[in-house]
Image (cartoon, helix red, strand yellow):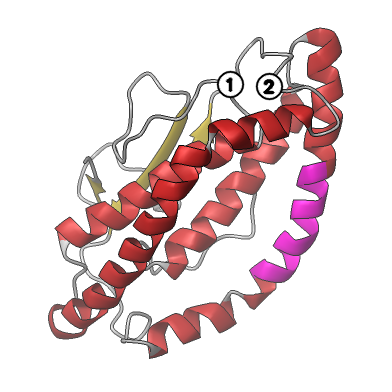
Amino acid sequence: MTMTTANEPGAPAAYPINVDVIRPEKQSRLTNFPLFIGSMIRYFLLIPHLIILYFFGLVAAFLYFIATFAILFTGRFPAGLYNFVAGYQRWTVNVSAYTFHLIDRYPPFSMDQQPDYPVSFEAIQPDTSSRLLNFPILGITIRFFILIPHYVILFFLIILEVIVVFIAQFAILFTGSFPSGMHSFVTGYLRWSTRLSAYTLGLSDKYPPFSLK
């Protein structure tokens, strides 16, 4: 499982959590068929992933809980635990991108970044983590409350995301392609929501930006 550290010269300077999706030139009309037919096909195909991610999500939450005690005493998220939580997040992003019709390639059963896969998730582990924001039980409560403005915005964004994907399915049916602007918006929504999840799981202590980019 790969992880970028804050000291690597290639690390992004902006936000330590990033998601990117390469827009395919052509997409399947079958798995993107309108009126949620394509979506139902995708969800059926994703059942094995959803089962695995359910259990991995429980493990990731438990490992973060353990990590909060390590952070309390050492000021650092143990690398092995960080890698697992980041890997779980990466797997979730891959599945979400497929669910949102951003790609047609079936997600890999892997926590690692696949070099030829059109979806990328990057988490840069900080050298030190906040003891307050990662204080056992209290820290997650603090994170939840300070993220409330994000949750309010995402409530409306997810409605727009569903509408955009619904329209895009008709575009794919007639043109074979997900319109670029719509694809960018849905990718931006995925990026925004992923940053909130990563922040909640302690992968970053830097407050998420109010941005699709």
Q: Which amino acid is tagged 2?
A: Thr
- Tag in front: 1 or 2: 2
- Expressed as whole percent of the image width and height from the top left, the position of residue 105 reads 51, 21
> Quick one: quadrant of the C terminus?
top right
Is 89 in the magenta? no
Circle 2: element type: loop
- Expressed as whole percent of the image width and height from the top left, the position of residue 175 reads 81, 9
Q: Count neighbours of disc 1 (C-alpha within 10 A) and say few if under 14, some if 14 to 19, many if 20 or more.
A: some
Q: Count neighbours of disc 2 (C-alpha within 10 A) and say few if under 14, some if 14 to 19, many if 20 or more.
A: some
Question: Mark 1 near mark 2, Cβ–Cβ under 8 Å?
Answer: yes
Residue 213 visible at all:
no
Is 153 in the magenta? yes
Identify the residue under disc 2.
31
Q: What residue appears at the point 78 percent right and 29 percent down from the top-left corner?
A: 37
- In this picture, is 118 found above or below 190? above
| Residue range highlighted in magenta | 150-162
Q: What residue appears at the point 65 percent right and 76 percent down from the top-left corner?
A: 148
Circle 1: element type: loop
Q: In which quarter of the view is residue 200 placed? A: bottom left
Q: Which amino acid is tagged 1?
A: Asp
Q: In which quarter of the view is residue 70 placed? A: bottom left
Residue 89 visible at all:
yes
Magenta residues: mostly which secondary structure? Answer: helix
- Expressed as whole percent of the image width and height from the top left, the position of residue 128 reads 22, 69
Q: In the figure, is residue 8 to the left or right of 14?
A: left
Q: Which mark is residue 104?
A: 1
